[in-house]
Image (cartoon, rainbow, N blue to C red):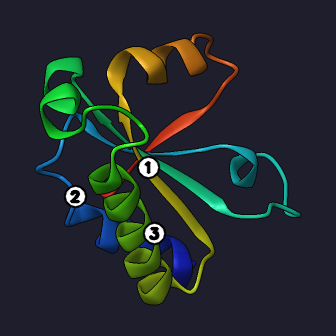
Amino acid sequence: MNQIFNLNVACRALKDFGVGTFHVGSSLERSDYHDVDLRCILPNKEFDAMFSDCQDPRFLFLNTAISEWITARTGLPIDFQFQRMTDANEQFPHPEHRRNGTGH
């Protein structure tokens, strides 16, 4: 419970980015997960204005820095990524692919 509470508190710092930060992936479905996947979904225009693409050094640096920052605050292995809204919705088009709001 402490880790989930701390995860929500840490993700509140990201509330001014995009439409929200979401917990996705295997850690929602099973106990033997490798890491906790967090995606901060940005509207397409906002993502494109911040990053030229997913190989943009700023994109890679911010994803890594935020992953390490949240890991330090929660003790959880975090994989944080900014994600373009269109890409997020293509990756999770169906209700059975869970995406839980975090830090709201």
Q: Earlier in the sequence, mark 2 or mark 3?
A: 2
Which is nearer the N-term, disc 1 or disc 3? 3
Task: Name the residue type under label 1.
Answer: Gln
Q: Amino acid at mark 3?
A: Ser
| In this view, the mark in front (1 or 2) | 1
In whole angstroms, how far apart are the C-alphas of marks 1 and 3?
8 Å
Residue lying at 41% horizontally and 76% vertically, measured from the top left: 70
In-front residue for pair 97/34: 34
Give the SS element for disc 3.
Answer: helix
**Percent position (x, y) of residue 27?**
72, 55
Dot 1 or dot 2: first in sequence order is 2
* Residue corresponding to mark 3: 67
Assign the N terminus to one quadrant of the image. bottom right
Circle 2 packing at 10 Å, graded few (<14), some (14-19), many (20+), is some
- Left/right placement of residue 51 relative to residue 74 reads left
32 or 84, which is in the foreground?
Answer: 84
